[in-house]
Amino acid sequence: MPTAREIMTPNVEFTRRDETVQVAAQRMREKDIGALPVCNADQRIDGVITDRDIAILVAAAGLDPAKTRIGDVVEEREVVTIGADDSVDEALQTMKQHSVRRVPVVDGHQIIGMISQGDIATTMPESKTGELVEAISEAP
């Protein structure tokens, strides 16, 4: 069974709490990604902002993305992560249990990559991908 490190997307982009939502959204568009980990000065992850967060918490709420800071919309909290040397089965279980489409991969406390549904789909059997999509789709 491969490890998270073997299937993750490395060199992950991240944002900071003091960055504007507009800058983060532009980075998501440029990199064709749907989420950015929010990291503190030590590159420890303490949140994640997704394209859906931007749509629901900023655009739909009528906030100006050029003036709204990431820290204004993303609560500082412990984030669901997976260890770099954990198995892909553990990553799948974590994603299913927490109903997340992406999970940051950490080595110690530093973020080194992300595993997304796309990473799972391109590296794992269809049945595993189907189970993940089904579990996430059924979540409230």
Image: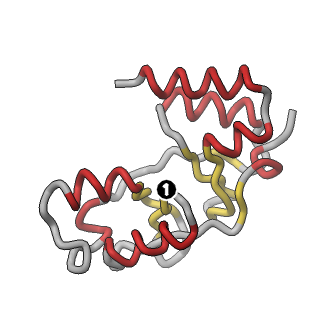
Q: In the rendered image of this protein, does residue 120 appear above or below residue 40? A: above
Q: Residue furthest right?
A: 1
Report the residue at 25% width, 79% height from top: 66
Frontmost residue, 51 versus 105? 51
Residue 12: x and y in percent read: 63, 66
30 with respect to 54 (left or right): right
Q: In the rendered image of this protein, does residue 43 appear above or below residue 90? A: below
**SS at mark 1?**
loop
Number of labels in the image equals 1
Residue 111: x and y in percent read: 62, 62
Query: In which image quadrant can residue 9 be found?
Result: bottom right
Residue 139: x and y in percent read: 41, 24
Residue carrying label 1: 34
27 with respect to 63 (left or right): right
Quadrant containing the N terminus in the rendered view? top right
Frontmost residue, 120 versus 71? 120
Quadrant containing the C terminus in the rendered view? top left
Report the residue at 15% width, 66% height from top: 63
60 with respect to 19 (left or right): left
Residue 72: x and y in percent read: 23, 66
* Residue type highlighted by circle 1: Gly
Query: In which image quadrant can residue 22 be found?
Result: bottom left
Report the residue at 49% width, 61% height from top: 37
Q: Residues within 10 Å of mark 1 (few under 14, many from 20)?
A: some
